[in-house]
Image (cartoon, rainbow, N blue to C red):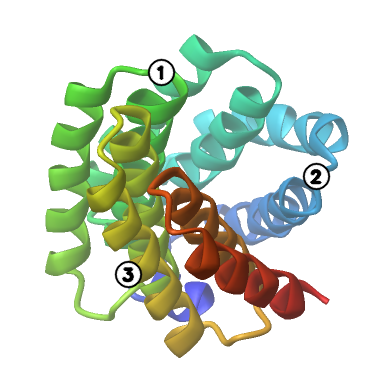
Amino acid sequence: DVAALRSEVRPPKDPDVRARVDALRKEIREAKALYDTGRYEAGLRVAAPVSTRARDIPYKPIQAEAFIVLAQLRAKDGAMADAENLLHEALWAAEASRHDFAAAESWVALTMLVGYRLARTDEGLRLGRHAAAALERMSTPAHELAALLENAIACIREARGEYDAALRHYQRATEIAEKHLGADHVRTSHFTHNAGMTLRKLGRFDESLRTLERALSLHE
């Protein structure tokens, strides 16, 4: 899980710095929970000051983690340029400190933001290759990030009108999520729904209906 992956990063040697990092991580978890439940304004009120305080701590892994969640919330607020800059800052901090999970998370988020939300599809696909490489180098698999990357690539392919390729990636995202996160996980139902909508665009209406009905049953 995420906690196990973060535990692979060497903690600060200074006990005072470690205490500050632990306190910030609690607030980052709070901001992330607000993001996951769609409470974006409340999440920003937590994440923005956390990011500011993280800059003053001489420990780059916590900077990367703080910048990622703030970037995700900024994107939901429509501040796409800020979000993109924050994700690059997160990536630099993660790579400098060998925080492999945060580096992979940054690449995946950049793939979705740049390639789909900012419609720079060629660049997004290139970022996706970096994300895949970052996931491959991790000693412990990050299954949720792998599923999110498949979904991001699918969104980009769909935006380009490449529906067959998009469907393959949506289905792969669903397979990973169902196997490793569970059939009742929100990601599984979300990716299944995306696959169903793409089947509709391909004119495979019976399959689309069955897939969308399954997505609904998973969500209930």
Residue located beneath label 2 in the image: 38
Amino acid carrying label 2: it is Gly
Near-viewer residue (76 or 192): 192
Give the class, few, some or many, for how many residues have Cα within 10 Å of label 1's Cα (few <14, many ≥20).
some
> Where 147 falls versus 199 (above or below)?
below
Going from N to C along the chain, the mark reached first, 3 or 1, is 1
> Gap in Å between the C-alphas at discs 2 and 3?
25 Å
Viewer-nearest of labels 2 and 3? 3
Which residue, given by chain and number where applicable, does mark 1 sit on? 85
Badge 1 element: helix
Residue 68 screen position, x and y as percent: 50, 40
Are dots 1 and 2 in contact, CB under 8 Å?
no
| Element carrying mark 3 | helix
Q: Determine the CA span between mark 3 and mark 1.
A: 29 Å
Q: Are marks 3 and 1 in contact (CB under 8 Å)?
A: no
Q: Earlier in the sequence, mark 2 or mark 3?
A: 2
Residue 21 percent coordinates (x, y): 58, 54
Q: Amino acid at mark 1?
A: Asn
At horizontal 54% and vertical 51% (from top left) the residue drawn is 197
Q: How many marks?
A: 3
Instruction: Identify the residue under disc 3.
Output: 172
**Label 3 vs label 1, nearer the camera:** 3
User: Is 186 in front, or is 3?
Assistant: 186
Residue at 22% across, 63% down? 135
